[in-house]
Image: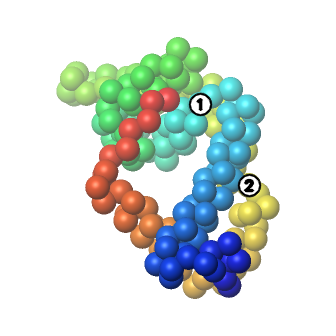
Amino acid sequence: MTRPELELLPPESAASEAILLALRRISRRVSLRSKQLVRHSGLTLPQLVCLKVLTQAAPNDATVAAIGHTMRLSSPTVTGIVDRLERSGYVQRVRDTVDRRRVFVRLTPAGHEKVDALPTPLDDGFMGRFRALPAQERETILHSLERIVALMEADEPLLDDEG
């Protein structure tokens, strides 16, 4: 499908512009959904992601470094996120009983309640339509998105946003 606004561009420029436009449209949709989640929860997006990471982590695996690795953020950034979540009562730091230098981050009961009350990160309508696609098409889309991310991150492997 050709886009009329791209027809006058050389083929490589048209492809580049089409990719940029598609990424902008995706980014806008994700941004709008993120803003809805932030409004609904009262937390920042990195805080929401951190809580989700903690729900999936084994109790003795959730160190600041491990959370940072999963979220692709630096330890100092994750420390700030965890500090704010701890002040809000959603997480607690627990020292390892064997190695007192290790500190684990765990959800509190209030943190579990907060996570359980969160709407899905992606719009339910989108997810329903996505699940309705054939499995092969879903895998192709996912592979393509992962490849785009890898290409974009080739020069900057660790993007670090405060949150």
The residue to which callout 1 is attached is 44
At 29% across and 55% down in the image, what residue appears? Answer: 155
Tell me the amino acid under the disc marked 1.
Thr
Residue 112 is situated, as x and y percent measured from the top left of the image, at 61, 33
The residue drawn where x is 32% and y is 36% is 74
- The reply to whether residue 142 is in sight is no
Q: Is residue 18 among what the camera can see?
A: yes
Quadrant of image for the N terminus: bottom right
Instruction: Between residue 9 and residue 156, name the one nearer to us.
Output: 9
Question: Residue at the location (20% across, 27% down)?
Answer: 99
Q: Secondary structure at mark 2?
A: loop
The three-letter amino acid code for the residue at tag 2 is Asp
Label 2 CA crowd tier, 10 Å (few <14, some 14–19, many 20+): few
Which residue is nearer to you in this view: 144 or 137?
144
Q: Is residue 143 left or right of residue 76?
A: right
Q: How is the image coloured?
A: rainbow
- Residue under label 2, please give it: 123
Q: Position of residue 3 (x, y in %)?
A: 68, 77
